[in-house]
Image (tube, helix red, strand yellow):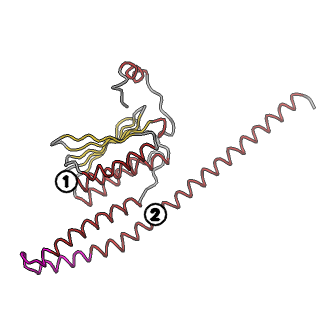
Amino acid sequence: MSSPIILLLGLLLTCVALGVAGLLRWRRARRVYEDRLRQLAERERVAASLHDTLLQSMQGMILRFQGVGHRLAVDSPERATIDNILDQADDVLAEGRHQILALRVPVVYGDKLSQALAAIGQSLQDNFGIPFSMVVSGRSTPLNGDRSEDLYVIAREALYHAFQHTQASSVELELVYGCEFFSVYVRDNGAATSTLLAGLAAMRERAARLSGTVDVLTLPQQGTELVIKVPGAVCYQTPRQLGWRHRLAAWLHPSDHRA
């Protein structure tokens, strides 16, 4: 057999092997994606069931107790006891909603993170009656699936804290698609609370898995800003190239450089 034919057969076999390997990799990725979709669907089913049964029933019981309390004298010990129990029940109900919210992780692969965060912000606005706004800066870039879920969970926790605990009159979310970093800013004009510090460790631990950071800036009379930063090389599906101006600024001012 002549040398050209051998080379051609070798090239053909190499192409077939690469094609088979690519097909197997695609099928494996598809199975992982479909398994994840099934897990999310089950979590959504459980969350909906809990909301429609447990929380709705508890809300009904609270309303009935309120009706009983209103029939008692304002200064009676029984009225004070019922009011105290109702306050505790409201806290339990709020925590239950928070846990159900945590169960619901939408599909945020690719460029769907901003849509998912806008939806959760709108939902919290409807529940708490606090105005919510969202800003997206930079060129929107698709994110890796697993990274998107982690970012969604961190931002959701920060938003929930801003709505639930700060007594703010407005909450703002900003997504910044920088060349070097993807950043999320959660701002409120309320008061800083110890609840944020308690949840900060979990946020930072999750961000650390992405080689990212979570920082908090609190200004008196102005509110709180929580900043999540993750390297673009980690979270973007296709890392973005830095422009010459960006590289020059980073070289001239390395300590001040930010995405």
Q: Residue at x 46, y 54 (%)?
A: 107
Q: Between 195 and 179, which is closer to the camera in this rendering?
A: 195
Viewer-nearest residue: 59 or 8? 59
Give the crowd class for mark 2: few <14, some 14-19, many >=20 residues within 10 Å.
Answer: some
Is residue 64 a member of the stretch shown in magenta?
Answer: yes
Image mark count: 2
Amino acid under label 1? Gln
On the rendered structure, is 242 left or right of 200?
right
Residue tagged 1:
167
Give the image location of residue 162, x and y in percent: 26, 51
Task: Judge whether 251 appears above or below 28 on screen.
Answer: above
Q: For mark 2, what is the residue?
A: 43
- For label 2, the SS is helix
Query: x, y (%) of residue 22?
Result: 67, 44
Type of amino acid at the residue the image marks with label 2? Arg
Region in magenta: 60-80
Residue at figure coordinates x 56%, y 58% from the top left: 35
Residue 178 position, x and y percent, is 39, 34
Q: Element at badge 1?
A: loop
| Mark-to-mark CA distance, 2 and 1 | 30 Å
For label 1, the crowd category at 10 Å Cα-Cα, with few meaning under 14, some 14 to 19 and many 20 or more, is some
